[in-house]
Image (tube, rainbow, N blue to C red):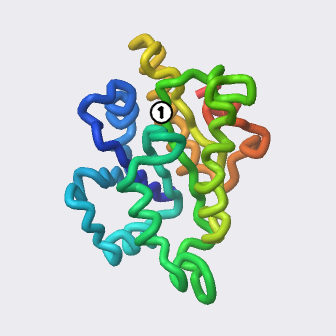
Amino acid sequence: MKKILVLFSHPKFEKSRANTSLVSHIQDMEDVTFHDLYEQYPDFHIDVDAEKELLAAHDIIVWHHPLYWYSCPPLMKQWIDMVLEFGWAYGPNGNALKGKTCLNVITTGGSKEVYCAQGSNSFTINEFLRPFEQTAILCGMQYYPPFAVMGTHQLSDNQLDTHSSTYKSLLELLQKEAVVLGVDNCVFLNDLPQLKTQ
């Protein structure tokens, strides 16, 4: 069973209906470490050595966060800047993360319709997440398309529960499968056929 590290970053987690639901479905899963960065580092003083130990102990890395100004909240960006060091995560002899799997789990207030060339945000979610994808590639990780819960303010309780259950099913699938079939043909991991049949 593969071990999953969920790096969660949300400065207003207690006010996020969507993320409260998503987290409640996965935080007690076996072999899943739920790591709330704002809870752990309210002063932004990141323990780099401890974070490296966490990364080394897991096979799959999940960046779980809301989309803040087309990126992640500031603590997650600081985590990336400080923890993924030259010579450790990338560069000469920087192979600590090589072969691990990485993906984003994101929530957005805007719907799919506003994240496209014709929409008010001009670009797709996947285009906004290119820096994360390139970070994973630079570190020798396999980057999967994101799992995205969009239009969160308009979702009914039932719709949100379905997304949250699918998130849990996704992590279970990632734990069991060395290779997730169909991932290269997905815009979002939400659309994997395997998740529709579970």
Q: Quadrant of residue 128?
A: top right
Residue 115, image x and y in percent? Answer: 64, 29
Q: Residue at x 61, y 47 (%)?
A: 129
On screen, residue 76 versus residue 189, left or right, reads left
On screen, residue 191 versus residue 161, left or right, reads right
Q: Residue at x 60, y 42 (%)?
A: 146
Q: Is residue 11 visible in the rendered structure shown here?
A: yes
Q: Residue 83 or 140: which is nearer the viewer?
A: 83
Q: Quadrant of residue 11?
A: top left
Q: Residue at x 63, y 65 (%)?
A: 141
Q: Say which element carries label 1.
A: strand
Amino acid type indicated by mark 1: Thr
Q: Residue 35 or 72: which is nearer the viewer?
A: 72
Q: Which residue is mark 1?
A: 107
Residue 116, image x and y in percent? Answer: 70, 29
Q: Is residue 31 visible in the rendered structure shown here?
A: no
Q: Quadrant of the C terminus?
A: top right
Q: Residue 173 or 93: which is nearer the viewer?
A: 93
Residue 149, image x and y in percent? Answer: 52, 29
Q: Residue 17 or 158: which is nearer the viewer?
A: 17
Residue 66, image x and y in percent? Answer: 44, 38
On screen, residue 96 versus residue 134, left or right, reads left
Reply above or below: 3 against 191.
below
Q: Residue at x 61, y 56 (%)?
A: 131
- The single residue placed furthest to the bottom in the displayed view is 92
